[in-house]
Image (tube, rainbow, N blue to C red):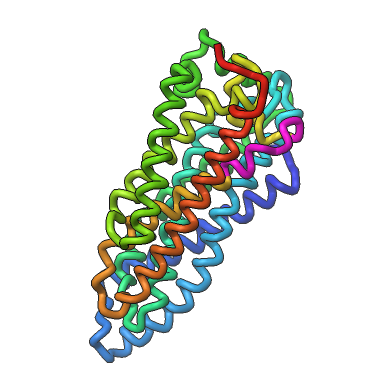
Amino acid sequence: MILQPAILALTVSSLLVSTMVLYSAFWGGVILRKWDISSGSELQLDLERRTYLVSTILAYFLALQVASLFLFIYTADDIATLFVGAMCAVGSLSVNGWGYPTLLLKLVNFLGAGIWLILNHADGQGYDYPLIRHKYLLLVIIAPFILAETIAQCAYFSLMRPDIITSCCGSLFSPASRSLLTDLATAPARPTMAIFYLFMSCTLGAGLYFSRKGRGGYLFALLSGISFIVSLVAVVSFISLYIYQMPAHHCPFCILEQDYCFAGYPLYGSLLAAGISGTGVGVLMPFRCIVSLVEVIPRMQRSLTISALWGFAIFTLLASWPILFSNFRLQ
């Protein structure tokens, strides 16, 4: 195992988060079976006190889970220089079979933790714990994924060896390589560009309509999820080409480096924030009629919609800037 402060921090934080999530999921199971807000029993009073404490602490731990995605990506990119053949996070994530599964699990848990935090905040605004069963059911669902991430991350870091020869992003995205990233890179750039701007325009339009009329929340959430996926494909397919100004450099990680002014961090940060906020609008839709949340949910949805609109707009602007103002042109 390679010992670095960031690796130690990720390992410790992951163990703490998974421990807290499993403990909370246990009590979540009890709450799902025993919760009765109309009861004045000793068990119910104990559950009410416990859920307030657990929810408060868990919110901080899941916020740490959200932040760990960026620290993991930064660490994977930073340690690339330790491996022969690696030039960015692509190489360091390829040193063993646990790198990319860890990244995928972190992305899934980033979205899951973000949605849980939204539900928890909404639940805290009601006087009768209106969403307590829903948020703990979600917690029970995401707990195995967080545990799996912890196991995968520990395996990834512990099985690292400095003498391993790995591959660079050039070989990963070469036509001879067979992988999902290669398929995305070889997707026709111009049709992908058209699809990207079409979905982004529809998403922004749906968000503006919902923010003004209060209708179409499910549509906006669906378009937000699709635009999130389409945007990730677009980064590999054509956005990266304009940032690098190279016709064959499709790497989604090199844009995180200083040579490219760390352009990847605001690009990915705005997209992730927009994806969670837009999806959160749809998650809250079924609860708009709950008496204790009848004024809270619309207010939260408006805030989430504005955040999503800003996130998608910033991502689109950052992606479009080199397309419009650089001398590079696709053939």
By secondary structure, the bulk of the magenta-drawn segment is best described as: helix
Residue at position x 57%, y 34% in the image: 319
Q: Judge left or right: residue 285 versus residue 111.
A: left
Q: Residue furthest top?
A: 176
Horizontal and vertical percent for residue 264?
63, 38
Q: Nearer the viewer, residue 72 or 311?
A: 311
Horizontal and vertical percent for residue 214?
31, 62
Residue at position x 50%, y 67% in the image: 58
Residue at position x 24%, y 88% in the image: 39
- Could you tell me which quadrant the C terminus lies in? top right
Residue at position x 54%, y 58% in the image: 17
Q: Judge left or right: residue 58 versus residue 266.
A: left
Q: Is residue 135 visible?
A: yes
Q: Nearer the viewer, residue 254 or 195?
A: 195
In the rendered image of this protein, does residue 33 appear above or below residue 242? below
In the rendered image of this protein, does residue 105 appear above or below residue 259? below
In the rendered image of this protein, does residue 36 appear above or below residue 27? below
Answer with the quarter of the image where residue 137 lies: bottom left
In the rendered image of this protein, does residue 203 appear above or below residue 99? below
Answer with the quarter of the image where residue 284 lies: bottom left
Q: Nearer the viewer, residue 7 or 74?
A: 74
Q: Which residues are magenta?
A: 258-268
Please say whether residue 264 is one of the residues in the magenta stretch: yes
